[in-house]
Amino acid sequence: MKDKLFIILQHILPQHALSAAMHRIARCTKPWFKNFIISRFVQYFQVNMAEATEPNPRKYESFNAFFTRSLNGHARTLESDPTNISCPVDGCISQIGDIRNSQLFQAKGKYFNLSALLGADPMTANFEDGHFTTIYLSPKDYHRIHFPNDATLTKMLHVPGDLFSVNPTTADNIDELFARNERVVAFFDTPAGPMAMVMVGAIFVSSIETIWHGEVTPPRHNQVRSWSYKENEHSFNKNDEMARFNMGSTIVLLYGKDNMSWAEELVAGQTVRLGQVIGKVK
């Protein structure tokens, strides 16, 4: 009953208005206000501030600056072998496996469509019968996204949509969740073949930004927006920072059919950390 009420509430809430309000609140710099929010957040979610470059919560100029905090040099061991694929985030694996008949497994018998996820872009063909993993970032996690391989950016999309929560309860109950929510999709060429990073927005996730573009959303739009980088390529090294969630959400990491495989020990529900090995380049 509790789960049903939670899902009903999400359908009736003004999702985009709430996210716009969170965008303003998260950037408030009034000391008494931001310190109150940050301290309560750290306490409630048991955030490990010892891992942060700045461990003192009061030193952050806003809640958003705290939420997107950087890690110190000792917090993670970053995998550097070019034949391995590194985990791009801290989080929990929601699902991991193969893309079959253009469908990705979501939860409890639910699937979502590959083409819908990628905004019906022609690049979708590169990922037919490929591989995917969905990783959920909880509120206490590190919220910067890094490159799992050396990569060259070729294209980016902003796909407008809903802003449902992306926690496990919602994934279990809302059809096509990750193909319905607002998302930013970045396509790359890598040693592991074509790769796509899908950064899925959610309620209170008021902003997604990339290092090559800055804030992609907001502002929000009613149609898919596209940027091509073939004439002005951006190349990155493995473990470089790629993007940030200004408030937490989920990524869907996609690879093509032939050039990689996931680490056999990885299963749904498993906690993963930035830099650990999650796959192998064939």
Image (cartoon, helix red, strand yellow):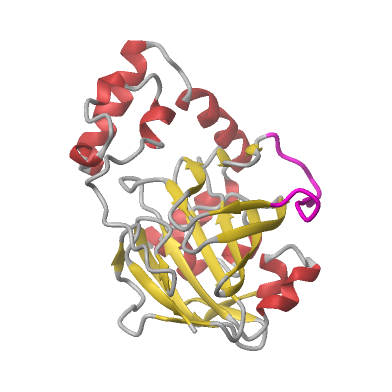
Residue at x 18% of width, y 38% of height = 50
Q: Which residues are magenta?
A: 219-233
User: Does the magenta-highlighted stretch encompass residue 231?
Assistant: yes
Which quarter of the figure is the N terminus placed in? bottom left
- Magenta segment's dominant SS is loop
Q: Left or right of 15: which side holds 265?
A: left
Q: Residue at x 60, y 87 (%)?
A: 100
**Residue 25, percent from left and from top:** 48, 24
List x then y, in percent, for residue 193. 61, 75
* Residue at 29% from the left image edge and 65% from the top image edge: 271
Q: Which quadrant would residue 272 be assigned to in this image?
A: bottom left
Residue 30 is left or right of residue 13, and the answer is left
On whether residue 259 falls in the magenta region, the answer is no
Answer above or below: position of 144 versus 29.
below
- Residue 113 location, x and y as percent? 66, 75
- Answer above or below: position of 143 versus 80: above
Q: Nearer the viewer, residue 117 or 127?
A: 127
Is residue 182 visible to us here? Answer: no
Is 98 left or right of 96, judged from the image as shown?
Answer: right
Residue 22 vs 106, above or below: the answer is: above
Coordinates of residue 197 in the picture (x, y in percent):
57, 61
* Residue 21 in view in this figure: yes
